[in-house]
Image (spheres, helix red, strand yellow):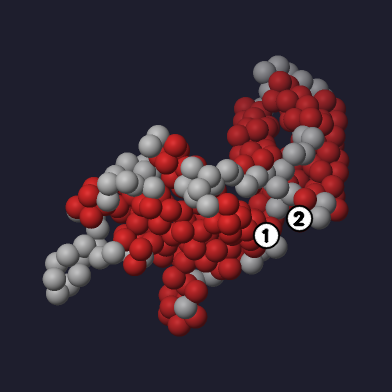
Amino acid sequence: MSTALEALDASIQEVTTARALISRIRSNQVRGADNLASMKSLAYAWFNNHRTMVEAGGSIDLSAINDAFQTVLNSTDKSAAKATYLGALTRAKNALVDVRTSILKTPLSSVRNSDDITPDFSPLAGNIQMQEVLAGRWSECCKCVSVEAHLAAIVMMGGLLEALFVARANKMENKGPLIRAVSAPKDRKTGRTLDYQEWMLDSYIKVGHELGWITDSAKQVAGVLKEFRNYVHPAKELRHGVSLALNDSAMFWNVTKALVRQLLSSAQEL
């Protein structure tokens, strides 16, 4: 939610600045190349950047804002009147403020993306009790992100992923590919592959990619999530000077959801 508010605040400030710029124009029409470029940039900033961030915060009616910025953008293709720009910018600001107020009045618990809905874990876990446990972990991840418990959220995500990787390994009737995987962790003394149920998340991510459970891009971002999960240790967090924010937990939650979908998809192919 904070990301949506930040996008709205940025857009409100940009509109305020743009209105001041247009107000200083002495002619009745806006023709200067610099002024037209500024108005185009303003509209594109909304349509290509800010709007996307606001829409990610939930189902919100942005039609009034879209209409106002569309008027601004359309006006740049002709010698539109100064009054046209000022009117559109005023409508845009009022609509932005209204949406911002609406978001602030909405309880955090009700702001949920459609892909936050608990998935069907049965392809990975046939046991009903385990499905319920996994669903509970998923729900806790959502709650932690929504109340801005950033570190707790990331730790929960790591735990959920680790459980799902183990479940995916359990689904394999032939464990040969798992044991023979190049990325599989080995006992330093014997050189034998460790029992997969004792692997750490990092090993699961590497082997999961090697066996085609997750994509290369998923492997890369999952590795970063794994590193942040380790900040559960206070000394490491202090040593690295890490500061977690909503953008981090929300971003990693999207990564986690993508990984979960890939693992579920790979299990359905068995």
Closer-to-camera residue (231/35): 231
* Left or right: where 238 falls relative to 105: left
Q: Mark 1 points at which residue?
A: 143
Quadrant (top left, top right, bottom left, bottom right) of the C terminus? top left
Asked if residue 10 can be seen in this view, the reply is no
Per the rendering, the mark at residue 109 is 2
Closer-to-camera residue (87/53): 53
- Quarter where residue 113 is shown: top right
**Image position, residue 98 (x, y; %):** 86, 44
**Image position, residue 255 (x, y; %):** 50, 49
| Residues marked 2 and 1 touching at CB (< 8 Å) | yes
Q: Report the number of numbered marks.
A: 2
* Left or right: where 267 falls relative to 243: left
The tag earlier along the polypeptide, 2 or 1, is 2
Residue in the image at 39% along x and 48% along y: 171
Q: Regarding mark 2 in the picture, which secondary structure is present there?
A: helix
Query: Mark 2 to mark 1: distance in Å?
Result: 7 Å
Asked if residue 92 can be seen in this view, the reply is yes
Residue in the image at 65% along x and 33% along y: 47
Query: Eyeballing the image, is 51 above or below 207?
Result: above
Closer-to-camera residue (179/104): 179
Closer-to-camera residue (266/152): 266
Residue in the image at 41% along x and 65% along y: 227
Query: Eyeballing the image, is 264 above or below 256?
Result: above
Residue type pointed to by label 2: Ser
- Quarter where residue 266 is shown: top left
Residue type pointed to by label 1: Lys
Q: Regarding mark 1 in the picture, which secondary structure is present there?
A: helix
**Image position, residue 41 (x, y; %):** 62, 34
**Image position, residue 33 (x, y; %):** 62, 27
